[in-house]
Amino acid sequence: MKNNQEILAALRVLIEPGSVAELRIIDCKDGNYSANYTGYFDDLAKMADAAMDFDGKAPAVYVTLHKCKPALLARAANRVIKAGKKSVSTSDHDVEKFCWFPVDADAKRPAGISSSAAEHEAAIERIRAICKNLQAAGWPEPIAADSGNGGHLLFKIDLANTPENVELMKTAMFALHQQFSDDLVEIDRTVFNPARIWKLYGTQTKKGDPTEDRPHRRAKLLHVPGQINQLSIDCLKQLAAKAKIETKTPSPRTTTTTPIGDGIDPAEWCRRNGLTVNFDASWKDGQKFQLTPCPFNDAHSEAVIIKHPSGAVSFKCLHNGCVGRTWQDLREKYEPDALRPKTPPAPAATPKVQLKPSIDPRIDVDRDLADMFDELQAQERGERITLPLPWHRLSRGSNALKPGTMTILAGPLKTGKSFFTMNIIRHIAEKGYKWAYLPLEDDRKAWSWRMLALLANDYRMINSDQEGVKLRADALATWQDDLSQCLRQVTENPRVGIKNSFGETIVPEVTHHRVLGWIARAAKTARVIVVDPISQIEFKGRDPWAQESEFVRNALGIISDTEASLILVAHTVKRSGAHADIALSAEDVQGSAMYTRLAHTTLLIDACDLRDVEILRSQGGRETVKHDRIVTIAAARNGSASRQRLAFIQDKNKPSFEELGYIAPRQKKGKQ
């Protein structure tokens, strides 16, 4: 309870009695994912209890530093809620007045790690120097605190939230930044905004992993004056007057006459470029989209894209390390070609012979050999290895789940492609690897019953007849924990549960750009990624084949950068008549030929009546077995069994597949 009392004591110092303040927890681990939490409190004891519940479970626990409007309590009254896409946190116009002039001295070090003892002490020493300097200029005695990685000073003020006072706070902080920042310690110049969140003293600060020389520390109050006197506005103005004007070299991008972002939908733009929108909300007659993390630095969590009423778009990150970053910078990072001025057509002239574009050889033997040695070392450490499939021969023959590769798994309807894929996913999970699944035909509930059938090895789990209620209930009780772990990695079908403004169900498009955005997000944490099936992706326009090609090439780029393995489930073209019994080939996969042309592995699954087939024994010779499934390794760029076929059998009551062996080639007449 000691920490709880420290937290409560800090809240009583920071927050005026009867005021409303927000408690915010960012990047809290929730199973395999991270989540943000928010709550509004006018009861400080309940706020301290809530903060204590999250202490040590997130990189930090924060509280708003200035007085919020009382109406905000209705968002989550004296309780904490999980921040979803529609959740709203405190914005600048939600703040009534400034209560503190904060000074944040942070040790300079690589992003995402705790400060060392020497770095930490340098930052604490810096706030002592600032305090001494300001008190010599007539400032009152401040609150001094340890942020866990640096030092804080807080001077009591009482200023209305007006544009003039925001500018005064900003300029005064900039003056401190210019005077006291150096190569060792940075004075944060960005903590001037009214909605500023601040480290809650008494809670742990956990940047990165703790090491002997960079431990996690607890933020704490170092000194609270017996009487906290208010800072005069004249002192602030005198400090602001010392700020030196920065001269910036104008960027050539600002010469454009087109409003930046005109016509762009920020939500769609973020999805297309793999950025995570944590939530969106109204903002000054426009719309604000909060990104987690900041696109320029994963350690920052205060980045927003704003869609203004005029249609223009802007970007800002309130972290000190991203000062000056703009929407142009963000587009330059993700869409550099979009900002390059269009070259006007050259005047008509005598035609000249044009050289055909060539390919840069990019030969660097030393780099190639170094990469090979790096791969060997990673392999020895158990990293960047090919993951096994549940079936030994198929796994060895295809090497389908090599890092950074794409596999097409295709077959006709009702052959069990989804269950076959889910068997792979379950096997990967048992090996301890993370995965992500995007179902585009079924919703999460249908997917859940399918997975329960797989866990219980009983097809009856997908039946909803009245007689099977007890059977399903018993299975759900038995496998609930395992199913819960699976569901944390399954995205809801984006077509499901969407309603218009009249409350009517609509079925929206799922464009290939949206799916690429999902793949990009999933690839940050998942080792294996599944899209099931790709036939449900929208490829519009006069030339859908070109869009499918674009989709495949971009997906390959994503997994190449992240070393994930991507499985795309596909249908095959319908065959009938004389062609019905012809074995499947890669040409039968629906959609663009680029799917199988660029994929590293193509597996085809087909069903047949239960029949005899000869398979090759591992020790030599042949054996006759009964089978009802055939899996063809149509292509295996990383394996040795291209064009080989494997016999499988599936119990009609169970969703598992048993591998029997390679199908033996037909013997020529006269040979035994």
Image (spheres, rainbow, N blue to C red):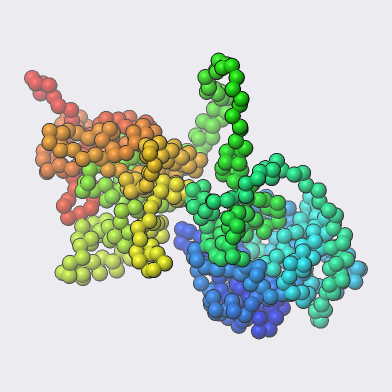
Q: In this view, does 509 lie above or below 284?
A: above
Return the residue found at the far bottom: 18
The image shows residue 442 at horizontal and vertical percentages of 30, 56
Taking the spot 67% from the left edge, 50% from the top edge, the residue there is 325
Q: Position of residue 121 (x, y in %)?
A: 77, 60
* Residue 45 in sight: no
Residues 636 and 362: in front is 362
Farthest residue to the left: give it. 670
Where is residue 20 shown, x and y percent of the image?
63, 79
- In front of the other: 589 or 450: 589
Res. 256 image quadrant: top right
- At 54% from the left and 75% from the top, the residue drawn is 75
Where is residue 367, by image quadrant?
A: top right
Indicate the quadrant where residue 4 lies: bottom right
| Residue depicted at x 59% and y 29% | 345
User: Could you tell me how many numbered marks the image carries?
Assistant: 0
Q: In this view, does 311 lie to the left or right of 577?
A: right
Q: Residue 509 location in percent, x, y?
A: 38, 52
Q: Is residue 230 visible?
A: yes
The residue positioned 23% from the left and 56% from the top of the image is 457
The vertical placement of 153 against 319, above or below, is below
Front-most of residues 122 and 40: 40
Question: In the drawing, does residue 626 fall left or right of residue 46?
Answer: left
Q: In this view, does 275 lie to the left or right of 21?
A: left
219 left or right, relative to 651:
right
Q: Quadrant of the N terminus?
A: bottom right
Q: Which of 172 and 641 is in front in this view?
A: 172
**Quadrant where the image shows the C terminus:** top left
